[in-house]
Image (cartoon, rainbow, N blue to C red):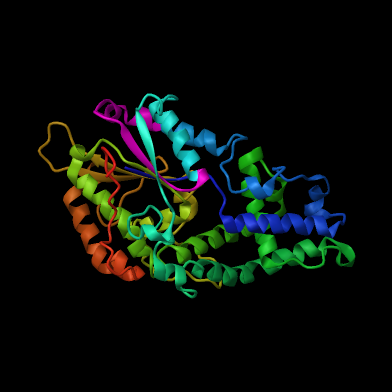
């Protein structure tokens, strides 16, 4: 079982970048100091409005390449599961162009380039609409209270980001402005400077490197990493009151499949946005912080935090839940968590081989978490909804 994030920048980042490009064009000035490269710099897309939030196709870190390569790696690692298939395999993707494209490239790497025409696999697209209610891959789009709560819902992370930006970005702004005489740059907002930092990563994905990276110091980048952690922490991570219930939805469905074992099917692959992985991590409590849970500070960065999204929610990040049995052993199965090709033990259950967790203990944990995070339908204000996912199964659609 795998839950995969495609390579794409967030829509809010896209808006920041487009605004930054407009600002650079409107200034029509000569840039000095660390920004002098801007005088001859061109954006990495001729049509940024249309192409910014799509899968990258060029450069050594192209999203299409990584998705295909990941499929090949899974084919190598789980070839015995491929051989055990008795029918067409189903994969699922949320209804976003970049997500669907990621799923298709992954399937080509896993099943072969002819995976669709040869009926080796089929891709089912799950709408990202509120009417899906609990039967969704994107609970942030169907949890009504999360959508409507202007204080602690979806925008909570952006608000907490703003608080932290105020603690570190003004120093960067002063440094950049000091390199230009007579107020040539005018002023820079916190979001404009933050957009410059984001530009480093996104341009690197497309071109392999970016001059924006050299604009900032090591301390600046440490603060940027923390800022990104804060966004996810309070938008859909442990700091958000709705995140646990949203993540438990898919965790529960997956636990049921793991408990059923091979009879349910050899593997299940779901493709979503990075923002939909954060709730799952929250429900799983794999990054639970004994010191800062459930509140990460916004006044300054804390270096000893457990919640670090750069290690788990990377571009093209993936979480794989493996069901293990030991040959010749009468022991019950075990569950192991593999995140971006690295085994990450569950802090509360790792007594099995290879830092795995006994399946029965894992199932008990999932049921206990429901009592702690709440029922999805109730937490989200979805009266009358059964509160579970129905499409996550192999075999014909129903």
Q: Quadrant of the C terminus?
A: top left
Residue 311 position within the rendered picture, expressed as x and y whole percent measured from the top left:
46, 50
Compared to residue 120, the image places residue 93 above or below, namely below
Q: Quadrant of residue 26?
A: bottom right
Q: Assess whether residue 94 is covered by the magenta stretch.
A: yes
- The extreme bottom residue here reads 151
Residue 107 position within the rendered picture, expressed as x and y whole percent measured from the top left:
42, 33
Residue 394 position within the rendered picture, expressed as x and y whole percent measured from the top left:
27, 39
Asked whether residue 344 is in view, the answer is yes
In the shown orientation, is residue 163 left or right of residue 196? left
Task: Tell me what residue is drawn at x 87 percent, y 54 percent.
Answer: 30
Residue 366 position within the rendered picture, expressed as x and y whole percent measured from the top left:
24, 58
Viewer-proximal residue among 345 and 112: 112
Magenta residues (range)? 72-98
Viewer-proximal residue among 103 and 381: 381
Task: Tell me what residue is drawn at x 31 percent, y 27 percent.
Answer: 79
Compared to residue 150, the image places residue 95 above or below, namely above
In the shown orientation, is residue 80 left or right of residue 232? left
In the shown orientation, is residue 316 left or right of residue 224? left
Q: Quadrant of residue 54?
A: top right
Task: Tell me what residue is drawn at x 76 percent, y 44 percent.
Answer: 42
Task: Tell me what residue is drawn at x 31 percent, y 49 percent.
Answer: 345
In the shown orientation, is residue 155 left or right of residue 209? left
Asked whether residue 287 is in view, the answer is no
Viewer-proximal residue among 312 and 277: 277
């Amino acid at each position: 079982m795998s839950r995969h994030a495609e390579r794409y920048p967030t829509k809010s980042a896209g808006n920041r970048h487009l605004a930054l490009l407009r600002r650079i064009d409107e200034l029509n000035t000569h840039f000095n100091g660390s920004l002098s490269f801007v005088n001859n710099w061109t954006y990495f897309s001729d049509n940024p409005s249309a192409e910014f939030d799509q899968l990258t196709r060029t450069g050594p870190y192209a999203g299409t390449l990584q998705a295909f390569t990941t499929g090949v790696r899974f084919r190598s690692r789980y070839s015995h599961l491929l051989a055990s298939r008795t029918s067409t395999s189903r994969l699922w993707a949320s209804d976003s162009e970049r997500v669907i494209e990621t799923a298709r490239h992954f399937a080509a790497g896993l099943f072969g380039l002819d995976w669709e025409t040869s009926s080796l696999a089929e891709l089912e697209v799950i709408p990202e609409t509120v009417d899906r209610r609990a039967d969704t891959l994107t609970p942030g789009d169907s949890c009504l209270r999360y959508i409507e709560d202007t204080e602690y819902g979806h925008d909570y992370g952006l608000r907490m980001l703003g608080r932290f930006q105020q603690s570190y970005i003004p120093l960067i702004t002063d440094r950049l402005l000091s390199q230009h005489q007579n107020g040539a740059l005018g002023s820079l907002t916190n979001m404009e400077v933050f957009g410059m930092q984001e530009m480093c990563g996104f341009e690197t994905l497309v071109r392999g490197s970016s001059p924006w990276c050299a604009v900032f110091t090591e301390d600046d980048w440490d603060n940027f990493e923390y800022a990104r952690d804060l966004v996810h922490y309070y938008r859909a991570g442990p700091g958000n009151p709705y995140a646990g219930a949203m993540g438990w939805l898919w965790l529960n469905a997956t636990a049921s499949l793991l408990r059923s074992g091979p009879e349910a099917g050899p593997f299940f692959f779901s493709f979503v946005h990075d923002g939909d992985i954060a709730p799952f991590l929250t429900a799983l409590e794999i990054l639970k912080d004994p010191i800062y849970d459930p509140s990460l500070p916004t006044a300054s960065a804390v270096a000893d935090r457990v919640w670090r999204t750069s290690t788990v929610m990377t571009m093209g990040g993936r979480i794989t839940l493996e069901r293990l049995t030991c040959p010749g052993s009468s022991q019950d199965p075990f569950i192991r968590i593999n995140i971006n090709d690295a085994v990450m033990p569950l802090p509360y259950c790792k007594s099995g081989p290879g830092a795995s967790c006994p399946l029965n203990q894992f199932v008990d944990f999932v049921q206990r978490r429901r009592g702690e995070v709440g029922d999805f339908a109730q937490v989200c204000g979805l009266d009358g909804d059964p509160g579970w996912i129905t499409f996550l199964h192999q075999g014909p659609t129903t």
